[in-house]
Image (cartoon, rainbow, N blue to C red):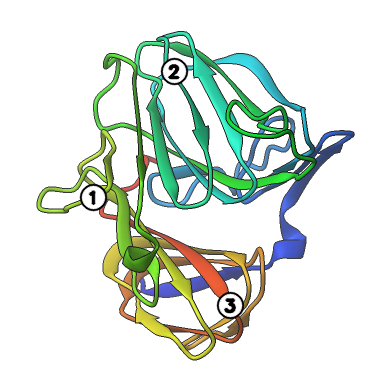
Amino acid sequence: MTPGMDVRRAGDRYKTRIGWLDSKHSFSFGHHHDPRNTHHGLLLVNNDDIVTPGMGFETHPHQDMEIVTWVLRGSLVHQDSEGHSGVIYPGLAQRMSAGTGILHSEKNDSWRLEGAKHEEPVHFVQMWVVPDEARIAPGYEQLELDDALLRGKLAIVASGMPGHDAAIRIKNKYAALHVARLEPGDSVDLPEAPFLHLFVPRGSVTLEGAGALGEGDAVRFTATGGQRVTAIDPAEILVWEMHATLAA
């Protein structure tokens, strides 16, 4: 593989906008299909979603996919056909293994399963990676992370890689999601891997060798890594480290 960095700007993402949803897609999704932009490494979906209060995605199916959800603001209610339910909020990592098949819904927690009603949109990033084994039993996991674990350094939030002490486990031994919350001037070094995907869902940073990245920008790395990321203003970054890719 030839080493490379492919910067993808926020404004170039596919967009789905309806009354209750503002969604931006990093890869082909729904009716947005580009055969040249279906995945990077093992990552097929990186959706940046804002959902208005009391609204959301009604019950729908998934199969053979590891789905990781990371909330930036507000709260999201999850319910699925396996009997799992929960409220996802900033700092809580969630993984759903679709496996042989699962139905689930995701809605803005405006009615508050706990506490008073609110009118705040929920902003979250949902990421899909393929499992390394098809037709597994559906599963669900969520875990709250101490904010200190994410401050000023990359924390392993979801991983299936051997030797990784991850917050939650995913069913792919070649993939891991790292997250960092950065204050201005904070720096982290990216891992080295055959495939990396850096996404900036909040704030702005500079990337060694590429310059400034704003909110919603992403970079796809091939056969490289180790570059330094430095926050310009308060920022959050999501980094997928991947040691395999889908067949062309």
**Cα separation between marks 2 and 1:** 24 Å
Give the answer, above or below, for where 130 lies relative to 149.
Answer: above
What amino acid does circle 2 point to? Gln
> Would you name the residue on which mark 1 appears?
166
What amino acid does circle 1 point to? Ala
What amino acid does circle 3 point to? Pro
Q: Earlier in the sequence, mark 2 or mark 1?
A: 2
Q: Which label is found at residue 63?
A: 2
Quick one: SS at disc 2? loop
Looking at the rendered image, the quarter that the C terminus falls into is: top left
Looking at the rendered image, the quarter that the N terminus falls into is: bottom left
Residue 83 placement: quadrant: top left
Q: Residue at x 89, y 34 (%)?
A: 19
Give the answer, above or below, for where 57 lies relative to 217.
Answer: above
Q: Earlier in the sequence, mark 3 or mark 1?
A: 1
**Cα separation between marks 3 and 2:** 36 Å
> Would you name the residue on which mark 3 appears?
234
Q: Position of residue 173 (x, y in %)?
A: 20, 42
Q: In the image, which is nearer the foreground, mark 3 or mark 2?
A: 3
Q: Position of residue 79 (x, y in %)?
A: 52, 18
**Cα separation between marks 3 and 1:** 24 Å
Task: Say left or right for 27 vs 108.
Answer: left
Instruction: Please tell me which residue lies in front, 55 or 69.
Output: 55
Q: Position of residue 212 (x, y in %)?
A: 61, 84
Mark 1 surroundings: few (<14), some (14-19) or many (≥20) residues within 10 A: some
Q: Residue at x 29, y 20 (%)?
A: 134
Q: Earlier in the sequence, mark 3 or mark 2?
A: 2
Quick one: SS at disc 1? loop
